[in-house]
Image (cartoon, helix red, strand yellow):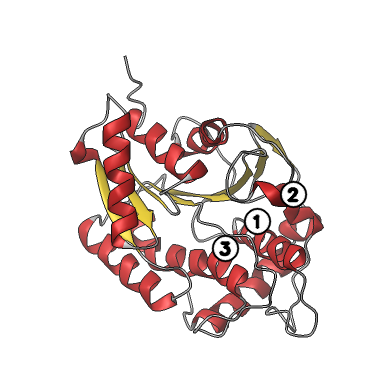
Amino acid sequence: MPSTSLSGSTVLVTGATAGIGFETARTLAQQGATVLVHGRTAEEAQAAVDALIATTTDITTAQLCALYADFTHLDEVEAMAHRVVETHPHLDVLVNNAGMAAPERHTITADGNEVAFQVNFLAHYLLTCLLEPALTSDPGGRVVNVSSSLHRTGNIQWSDPNRVRRYSRLAAYAQSQLALTVFAADPRVTAVSIHPGICDTALLPLYSHEGAVPAEGAAYVARLCDPAVEIVNGAYYDRDQRVDPAPAAAEHRSVQRLNKLAAQLTGHTA
């Protein structure tokens, strides 16, 4: 008998076409939620929805909705956010999961940002800001940022966030994960961040040679989506344990500086 702990809830999962995002969407739908399944293109998002229906017995087509936006284009993120607010004016949970490894070569998007910083953090910042009315339309709305233990190795280059002067793919990735973790402490929407463990996904080479199945990481993410699980705004979890994040993620000044920087880079002031 499937759990119905999320019956009546609506959850948006970014990067839900593969890996932890795909398995998180599956788990949440099995628990009764309506899941907005985000992919980079309309085709990828619809393929993920079709795959979830085909491989899971206890979820229905009515529970899943395909959404798309290429996070390397902020105008697509904005368009998707507007579609969500129109079709789902009340959103219970936003899972900011979409992510990429920074490329070997320094890469700048059409919006003028280092690509990993934009895809992993700025797009999620913009999406969260634009979805704030839907997330706060009723008490209890929350954001779950799927971060990484590598945020501890990162630092935000405030004067050069695009790392034009000195680029390393690991440093760029760690910076994006630190920013996502710091952003969870923003007071406007209740949010947490989580390192779901090392899983066998496209990001595995950044961490190790082998990892757990994505469903294992997804279980930790889905747990934080459950309204029965009490959370503290800004908290950081390593799998199912609440632990202290990197010191920068707990500094009020870091949150303020990051908001100012992100507003400037996305052209959206919250």
At mark 1, the secondary structure is helix
Q: Which residue is mark 2?
A: 245
Give the Cα separation between the discs numbered 1 and 3.
11 Å
Q: Would you place residue 16 above or below residue 186 in this image?
A: above
* Amino acid type at image mark 2: Pro
Q: Give the residue type at disc 1.
A: Thr
Residue 182 in picture, x, y percent from top left: 66, 60
Q: Place residue 251 in its image quadrant.
A: bottom right
Q: Which residue corresponds to mark 3? A: 120
Give the foreground label among 3 and 2. 3
**Observer-nearest residue: 133 or 13?**
13
Q: Residue furthest top?
A: 1
Mark nearer the N terminus (3 vs 2): 3
Query: Looking at the image, do the residues carrying marks 1 and 3 touch, with CB atoms under 8 Å apart?
Result: no
Image position, residue 166 (x, y; %): 80, 80
Q: Nearer the viewer, residue 129 or 12?
A: 12
In the picture, measured across the screen, residue 268 lies left or right of residue 243, that is left
- Snapshot quadrant of residue 14: bottom left
